[in-house]
Image (tube, coloured by chain):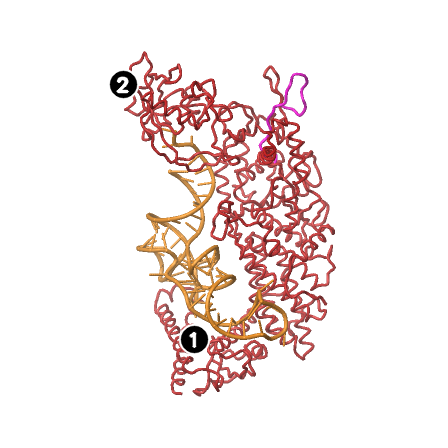
Amino acid sequence: MVDLPKAYDPAASEAELYADWVEAGVFHAEHDDPGEPFSIVIPPPNVTGSLHVGHALDNTIQDAIIRRERMRGKNAVWVPGLDHAGIATQTVVEKQLAAEGLTRHDLGREAFIERVWKWKAESGGTILDQLKQLGASCDWEREAFTFDEQRNVAVEKVFIDLYDQGLIYRGNRLINWDPVANTALSDIEVEHDEVTGELASFRYLWADDEPGPAGFEDGLVVATTRAETMLGDTAIAVHPEDERYTAVIGRHVKHPFQDRTFAVIADEYVDPEFGSGAVKITPAHDPNDYEIGLRHDLPMLTMLNLDGTVNDEHGGEFAGLDRFEARTAIKARLDELGLLVEVKPHVHQVGHSSRSKAVVEPMLSDQWFVDVRSMADKAIESVRSGRVTFIPSRLGEQFIVWLENLHDWCISRQLWWGHRIPAWHHESGEIKVQSDSPGEGWEQDPDVLDTWFSSQLWPFVLFGWPEDTPELRTWFPTSTLVTGYDINTFWVARMVMISEQFLGKEPFAIVHNHGLVRDEHGKKMSKSFGNVIDPLDLIAEFGADATRFALLRSAAPGVDVPLARDWVEGEKKFANKLWNALRFALSNLDGVTPGELPPPERRTLDDRWVLSRLEAARAEADAAYEVYDWPIVCRSLRSFAWNELADWYLESVKVRIYGEDEAAASDAKAVLAVVLDELLRLLHPTMPFVTETLWRGLTGAAGGRESLALAAWPTAVSERDPEAEEAFALVQDLVTEVRRFRSQNGVADKVRFALDVATDARELLAPHTTVLRALAGLDEVRFVDEASEDPGLARVLFSRGVATTPLAGLIDVEEEISRLRKELGKAEGMLKGIAGKLANDSFVANAPEQVVAAERERQVATETRIDELASQISTLEAL
RNA sequence: GGGCGCGUAGCUCAAUGGCUAGAGCGCUGUCUUCACACGGCAGAGGUUGGAGGUUCGAUACCUCCCGCGCCCACCA
């Protein structure tokens, strides 16, 4: 017999259990292990990271999935790893350097990278250790890093092959420049935030040899939110059909600060409704203007340095000023020259770097790009055809739309930490793409690849690609990818594209998107709001199981997940409830372990009922597990465990367990053991620790390879039993009514009395009076044909009849009358509703037969009840 | 500007077009009975955002409105 402490203490056992699982290789899989392959690759957390609630959710879901599949006998592997997270990691280490008064340039490239590796070695494993605290059942023997030796080989191969296929090219194009991190960014690394800026209007005067046409003697007014870019203006555009401006098309204006002129051109892009209807064109610093510049073959003048200051070439008196200082200075100068027309507030979207939060500057630059169109089209087809399914499906739609509008991907970053681009530049300007230096006079491209370029390979490089390994053949394509919808664009889309390109297959069959974890009111967690919850605190205080369960119970696919400390505490209480249910069982089972159920004829009503309800919960939870509907998984199991098993069955089973009849007691124990065993199995993927501890206690399993984590996933132990459910529901109804009677009349539970029951369900109820007596605290239950009219009786009404007991000082008559009146009013209201329904001919004609029949039954029952209530009230009043 | 999602009890959320719209937390009362006070029992609490429509019947389907949130997008 196992002796459990009175209250569950997660901290006492979690670490030890985890070590035991790992020691026994419970999480490790080999390619030739038995079972159908099932694989998940972890979305690799940043090496800089520490576990936050988002990770906790993401990994809890993956763990629940992989644990269930493992129990189902699959050859299940969950491969963990870390992302080198180029820009994020470099930023962290640069900050450390800054604290020492250094920049990365002081160290130089090699020393800096060495420094990052050193830091990675010291603290890179933190988040993986934290995953262990959460209970994540990763196969740690397969841990990988996006920047390790093996992954490097793959990254280089992919780059070189794509280049050879013409899908990677180098180009001088307008890209998003982050002037703080000093690197190019891809489009999706730019976040558009609404900002209240200003719209400045100023005028360009006509070129000296070109007086303005009638109506435009004073020049041409243009508007801009970034006045400083006028240093790079090379045209003014108007709409070709804008009659106001027909006369000025082809004329030239002069630049106020530079010795040059440029033309007024016509382009359909211009919206005549906006501003003055004339747009200044800066092809080198604005995406629209860039397009116009290409169409009209305009000069592209870059007027900013990479650090965001105005350059010498076109800056003139403004050279060296920061772009925002320049904005002010230029407006001031324009004003002095009498050229500034007005400045008014303007709300618009401004692109910010998702990393540094700096305002992104569109810049012309030489960068490497991936031509994504053909791969994107294939990826769209993968989703359309259902070869990749999204859960929830609406996110698949969104995914397709995004792929349809995808532009080429700028993959070069002006950073040091990351995969160096395998391209070599010759003094002559020639470029070669290959792993090793072509020889003397060749310099390797200084840039590194976007972090996502390497993580897109994750689902196959984890299994050894480009080698043709047995692991790759076994576990690729992977089964399910679990991730927040927020990185579908960054990561998921690119995995689909690149997997198809290089392995000819989609990398996974299912993408399960969960939402983002928010606070209890749906607000984003952030340091500035002070509403951040640290999952490690939760685990320390309430246990990993409670933390996991609290996350899962709100994690409907694709829907953001609210979380509050109190809710986690609530799930700790659930764990404690389970703990105590098992504590009760273990102290009473006397060594009975889960095995065969007693034959049907020896099962009592409560046995049949609990088995039927268990099967209902199992079926519901299992189906929900299958479609990753976590709230239903949690709700069905929690409510069975607490509201049915603990609240009713454990109470009713005491009758036999504490009773004299040893055969009955042993049948009861057998059923109890089976039910608990199955419940623990069903809950294990969500709450691995407490279920493992309790299951070992229940079964006597030794741990190690004899772990619940390796036990079989439950199938139906019995069928649903509608008859038992109906009968037991009646028992519950009568018990509840008796309790209500007690509660409302101040009759203490320990005051026992006899009950005369008049019911049309006598046959159903009669065999179960023992349970009835135990649960309702009755001396005796007698069945009578008709309820006595004796005014000296208290009446307890239930759905199928009425029960009476001598008042004999039990209750307060006045109170009872008022209670009955209330109930009568309620019943009359209900009857009115039913009668109205049945009087409606079209209802009777059109509703399904069972529905109409049920209505009729309710009508009769309600009428009977009203009669009874009325007579009861009058008899009481007679007293 | 385009697309998507959401408005149900004080809070967070459920309810194949059909029983009296449910659960958890919170709240009220009550009980320390031998699994559990991290608990039991009982209870209060709803014009399902608003207005129309379809239907015998709408929380659910349709239209419009109001409010909230997210994604995408190059209007200076």
Q: Is residue A615 above or below residue A513?
A: below
Residue that appears at 29% across and 21% down: A246
Q: Nearer the viewer, residue B35 or A180?
A: A180
Q: Is residue A858 above or below residue A451?
A: below
When asked about the image quadrant of residue A245, the answer is top left
Q: Nearer the viewer, residue A508 or A319?
A: A319
Pointers 2 and 1 within a single chain: yes
Q: Residue reaching furthest top? A: A209
Q: Residue reaching furthest left? A: A214
Residue A217's label in the rendered image is 2
Determine whether, in the image, residue A536 is placed left or right of residue A746: right
- Residue indicated by mark 1: A861
State the hue of chain B.
orange
Q: Earlier in the sequence, mark 2 or mark 1?
A: 2
Closer to the camera: disc 2 or disc 1? 2
Residue that appears at 32% across and 27% down: A277
Chain of the residue displaying label 2: A
Q: Is residue A122 visible?
A: yes
At label 2, counting other C-alpha atoms closer than 10 Å, the crowd grade (few under 14, some 14-19, many 20 or more) is few
Q: Secondary structure at mark 2?
A: loop
Provide the letter of the chain coloured red. A
Identify the image quadrant of the N terminus of chain A: bottom right
Magenta span includes A441: yes
Q: Which residues are magenta?
A: A433-454
Identify the image quadrant of the C terminus of chain A: bottom left
